[in-house]
Amino acid sequence: MSALTEHQAREEMCRVGQSLFARGYVHATAGNISVRLDDGFLITPTDACLGFLDPARLSKLNLQGEQISGDKASKTIALHTRIYAAAQQFDVHTRCVIHTHSTHCVALTLHDGLINTAVDTRELLPAVTPYFVMKVGHVPVIDYHRPGAVPAADAVERAILHYGQQGTPIRAVMLSRLGPNVWHDSPASAMAILEELEETARLVQLSAHPISPLSQPQLQELRDAFGARW
């Protein structure tokens, strides 16, 4: 799709933020949304509630990450710019990043068996449903770091490059104990990724029994029919 104008991007960020807040995907002042423009970035201000954003007060930064207008930018712009730089190597249309503290996703990272294993082998969820495989794909888990820590951004960049180089580009990472970052070509598309991810995590949390992932023949069928990158 064609890139949004700055005016369209401001309106869409506020619409998506309000929708996520109204449906419980974000709470209080948790979470942030950014859009990459041709001449810089828009991002939600620090400590802003996504349910009550003002298009005129969104933070705007130039391509060097320097703020030029709006309220004070969220500190997560540093991570978002790293995501854009890495993800656009595999999808040039990457234009929006959304971060939330989605309840069921975070809950899955609180188990000792997940937290203390090696980063390169950890993913948040197995291939449990066809739409999770088709719409979201692999979601590597990043070891816990304090919010805004540079090592977390380094690890996210490494994960994006690792999966992309092996032919399975990703659209989401999970920051342990914090929440997911998802990206796509627009706020609406990124929101759809987040919704599918959180609802899949909720299904796993609600299951009273161990979940069997899709088989390799079933995954191959999704690759052949829909181009699933799994």
Image (spheres, helix red, strand yellow):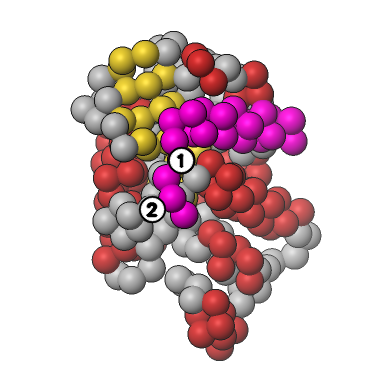
Left or right: 41 as drawn, with respect to 222: left
Depth check, front residue: 52 or 24? 52
Magenta segment boundaries in residue numbering: 1-24
Residue beneath disc 1: 4
Asked whether residue 209 appears in the rendered view, the answer is yes
Residue beneath disc 2: 93
Q: Is residue 182 above or below residue 26?
A: below
Q: Is residue 49 above or below residue 40?
A: above
N-terminal-most mark, 1 or 2: 1
Quarter of image, res 67? top left
Magenta stretch containing residue 9, yes or no?
A: yes
Depth check, front residue: 59 or 115? 59
Residue 136 placement (x, y as % from top left): 53, 59
- Residue flagged by tag 1: what amino acid is it? Leu
Per the model, the C-alpha gap separating discs 1 and 2 is: 11 Å
Left or right: 134 as drawn, with respect to 153: right
Element type at mark 2: loop
Quarter of image, res 149? top left
- Residue flagged by tag 2: what amino acid is it? His
